[in-house]
Image (cartoon, grey):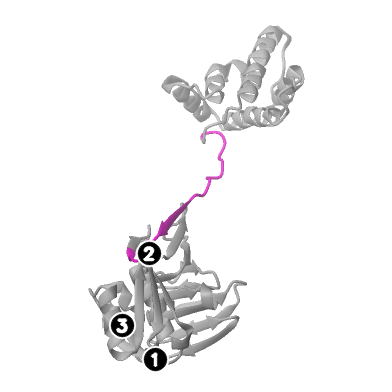
Amino acid sequence: MKIQNIPFEAISAKLKNGAGADDIRQIQEWLELSPENPVTLTEIVNIWSVTKGKPKYYQPDLTYNWNKLIQRINYQSRRKNSLILFTRMVAAAAVLILVFIAGITLSDRFVTHPQKITYSKIISPKGNKTQIILPDSSKVWLNSGAELRYPSDYTAQNREVWMKGECFFQVQKDPDHPLLVHGTKIQVKVFGTCFNIREDESKDLSDVTLLSGKVEVLNLRNQKISDLNPGQQLIYQKGISQILTPKNMDAMTSWVHNILIFNNQPFEEVIRYLNGWYGVDIQLDRSLYYRHNYTFKVKTESLREVLELITIITPINYKIEGDQIKIKYKMK
């Protein structure tokens, strides 16, 4: 190989991130001339990479670096070319120094750098429900105050999300590439499914309700807890799991359709749902805990209308102060 065949000026411009269209074309044409040329370019880049890793005050041995390069590409030095060789050596080494001092990064044509992964985070405001569509066309509904996070490298082949609160998933089916949902207490491996996952940090409780398809529930150590079949609900609390068969599955996921259904549920649980539904802070007198169960449906009713309904069947007084409501037992 002739040393003058190497497009030093174009490579220098590329290393300095100043290459024009002619420089790129010249480099590409040279790379296609011989299978040895990509190797030569690799050696140039390798020496540059080693040099740029030194401290800023480091002055590389130009003669040593160039000789090392020539030996690697099996170039046989000739006396009559010694002046040309020295000139080229200084020019190429100078490029390496300039690139090093400036801290310039090679383009992907020469060096492939790992892509930095970023995350998209969606938060559903208090008192609201939010729907998003993931890059693989899977749909997720976020209940009041819920959070969902997914990486920039999320694809149909690499499906992984993180969530808090309560979310309903409608996942595109792909048995070979399951979606992995990371909760704060459990994980759910999804193969193409409609399911609801809810986490209540105040009770250290998580539950997964499966409407259709197939899911596998894991703990945070990736140990399998159980598979779920449609119509089943897994409850996981303080490391203990149990599987139930709810009588009214619609009540578990009705919030997705902007309906809140209570089916013989205790007062304190009703209050917890109303807090999220209306984005308020209801403080319930503890004397009312475990004393009353409720069965009713909320669609478009205001919070005051719901509270008035409760007062009809339960002896309570309530006081609204902004977004704080206090409910006390009404003494006769």
In contact (CB < 8 Å): disc 1 and disc 3: no
User: What is the total number of numbered labels drawn onto the structure image?
Assistant: 3
Residue 126 is labelled as 2
Observer-nearest of 16 and 292: 292
* Mark 1 surroundings within 10 Å by alpha-carbon count, few (fewer than 14), some (14 through 19), many (20 or more): few
**If the image is split into quadrants, where does the C terminus sit?**
bottom left
Mark 3: secondary structure: strand
N-terminal of the pair, mark 1 or mark 3, is 3
User: Which residue is rendered at x = 73% and y = 18% of the image?
Assistant: 62
- Residue 228 visible, this angle: no
User: Which residue is rendered at x = 75% and y = 23% of the image?
Assistant: 58
Q: Where is residue 331 in the image (x, y as percent from the top left)?
A: 39, 89
Label 1 and label 2: CA atoms lie apart by: 26 Å
Q: Where is residue 2 in the image (x, y as percent from the top left)?
A: 61, 18
Observer-nearest of 286 and 86: 286
- Residue 54 visible, this angle: yes
Amino acid on which disc 3 is placed: Ile
Label 1 and label 3: CA atoms lie apart by: 16 Å
Q: From the viewer's perspective, is 144 left or right of 45?
A: left
Q: Name the residue under label 1.
A: 292
Amino acid on which disc 1 is placed: His
Q: Give the range drawn in magenta.
A: 109-130
Residue mark closest to the camera, 2 vs 3 = 2
N-terminal of the pair, mark 1 or mark 2, is 2
Q: Mark 3 points at which residue?
A: 261
Q: Where is residue 29 in the image (x, y as percent from the top left)?
A: 47, 25
**If the image is split into quadrants, where does the N terminus sit?**
top right
Label 2 and label 3: CA atoms lie apart by: 19 Å
- Where is 232 relative to 146, above or below? below
